[in-house]
Structures are given as C-alpha cells and as structure tokens.
Amino acid sequence: MEHHLPNNIRAMRKARGFTQEQLAEAMGVTVGAVSKWELGQSAPDLSMLMELADFFDASVDALLGYTLRENSAELAAERIRALRNERRFDEGTAEADKALQKYPNHFNVVMQSARAYAFSALERDDPVPQRRALALYQHALTLLGQNTDPEISEVSISNDIAVLHLALGETEKALEVWRKYNYDGLNDAAIGMTLAAHCKKPDEALPVLSTALVNSIIGIIRVVNGYINAYAQKNELQQALQIALWCCALVDGLRPERAVCAFDKLEAAFLGFCASAALDLHDEEAARKHLRRAATLADAFDRAPTYYAVGSIRFYCGKDAQLSDDLGQTADGAVENALRECSNADALLRLWQKVKEELQ
C-alpha cells in the first residue's frame, strides 16, 4: 500500500493557483507546516486531512493517493515469479514469505515461493534457503489437486526436489527420487551424471548414460525434423538447411571409425532434404554434394545394415538396444521417399539418379 500525500497536496495547491502562504492562511496553519507537508517531513492530522480534502473538493482517499495493491493469491504468485525471473532473489523470497502468511495452502503461491527459494539457494549454494525450498516443494505436492498448469506434475515437482537433495549433498535421496520417477528413461541423464560425478561409480554410470545418449539423439532428431518442416512451410530455407546440416554433423560425431552407424539411414534422408533446400536456393553444386554424401551413406548402410546400438554408436556401452524407424526397408529407399515429399521432387530425383550413376 502506498500513498502520495506530499505530492498530492502540492499538485492540488498549484492546480488551484495557491501559494504555500495562501494555503497556510486558508487552513489556519503556518507556512512552515504546509512546507513540511509537501516535503513529506510531517503529515496533517486526521481532522486537517478532512479540511484539506473539503478545501480541494476531493475525497480523503484521493488526497492521500492511496493505491491498494491487488493482493489476490494469483497476483501474489505472479509477483514472486516476476521477481525470480528478474533475478531479484532477496525481494522474491521476501515477497514469498508475505504471500505464504496470507495464502499458506494456495498451490501456485507455494509453488512459486518454492521456486523463488530454490533459484536463490542454488545460485548461492546456501543450505538454509535450499531446505526452505525443499519443504515448500513437498508441501506443493500435497496441494497438487489445485494445479491447473499442464507443465507442472508430481513428476516435475519431484525432480525439482531431487535437484535440491543433490545440492544438499543428499545423493542417495536424489537418486531414489530420480529412479522412482524415471518414466521412459526421463531421468537417465541425471542418474548417470550423479553416479559418475558424485558417487564415483563409472561402471554403473556408463550404461545409464548410454541409454540417455541414444534417447537424447532420438529426441534431437525429432526436434530437428519439426524445425525443418516449420522452416520449410515458412519458406525460410536457409534456416531449415542449417539446422538439418547441424543434425547431420551431430550424428556424424557418433559414427564409430570405419563402421556403419545405426542413424545413417536417417542422416541420408536428412541430406536429401538438404539437397532440396540447396536446389531451391539456386545452389546446384551444394545439392549435388549433399546427394553424393547421402548416396555414400545409403550404399554403406544397405550393404551392412545395422539397427543395434552396440558397435554402431560411438560411446555406447549399455545393453544392446535395437533402434527402429519408419523410413522404409533400405537407406536408398529412405532418401528417395524423402525426395518425393519435396516441392521440387522431379528435379531432385533426376539429380539423385545422376549422382548415383557417377558414383558407380
């Protein structure tokens, strides 16, 4: 709650063309009293406030200039979130404490307060706010029925709790939580990192990290495929080309020396799109280069196809997982299918045949 009495007395006096002396005379006070009111060094008593309001034809509230800050729980939670995003951590936790006194069982207030303390604690490596954040996250779990945010769930809150356990040196507790909520390998990266860096158990860490590696690459490939389609629809071909080539370079880095990689069929298909983008950008030589690379990868893969991670993905040392795709039976066919889906399919397919003939 704020008031602006000094400024309002001055503004209202000037709006009516009064000097401090004239206002003092009208109110029956000294000029020094009016000066102190306008400087904020003192304030009129209640009866004088009423007289001033009457004199200026204003309400007492208008004279005081009170602005009641909206204090609903949701707006309180939003203030806490905004302060955290602005990295004003001390103000954010202070705001959280005030909000929690008023709304101790409001999910969003508790959740945003937990995050305010967690961000502050993790940056400063301070166990006191870490414990406070941990308690608030645990309380948020009991209030989860109020949640309306689809991005927040028991799993996401529990994983935040695991991060705090790790920061507090409670490694086994962190691992216990991550393992409990490790749906579809969601927490493999965190588990593997913790086993290696904090528990010094490389033999346990490497298989978990291997699974995380493959799942991460599959996730990246899906993301890149989405980007390619989105950029192509917006006719931002240079952007589409660049992200496709970045993904190809990433996959290249996972290829064992002198061996076929399980991702080669997919990379060959991506290179087909790269050729399409290059052709639309009037760079036929670049299109030929991408198609030559696609043909080389496709030929090597089709001669000795592999869908197993062990031996075909660099750094992988877990169980021999089998990978699958929906690109067709052969890598050569996968490239052709990709080319047929492009807007310049006819020109691409002719160039594709020429490139393959040149390589034979």
Image (cartoon, rainbow, N blue to C red):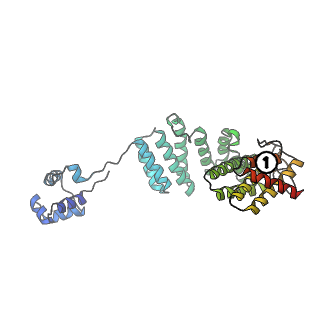
Residue 298 spot, x, y in % from top left: 83, 51
Residue 97 spot, x, y in % from top left: 44, 47
Q: Residue at x 44, y 40 (%)?
A: 104
Q: Is residue 222 left or right of residue 93?
A: right
Residue 69 spot, x, y in % from top left: 34, 48
In front here: 310 or 107? 310
Q: Amino acid at mark 1?
A: Glu
Q: Is residue 284 left or right of residue 88?
A: right
The answer to whether residue 254 shows anywhere in this view is no
Tally the marks.
1
In front here: 282 or 76? 282
Q: Is residue 66 left or right of residue 91?
A: left
Dividing the image into 4 quarters, which one contains the C terminus?
bottom right
Q: Residue at x 80, y 54 (%)?
A: 352
Q: Which residue is mark 1?
A: 336
Crowd tier of the residue under label 1, counting other residues whose Cα lies within 10 Å: few below 14, some 14–19, many 20 or above = many
Q: Is residue 321 above or below residue 270?
A: above
In front here: 207 or 270? 270
- Image quadrant where residue 4 sits: bottom left
Q: Is residue 79 above or below residue 147?
A: below
Residue 98 spot, x, y in % from top left: 41, 47
Assign a secondary structure to mark 1.
helix
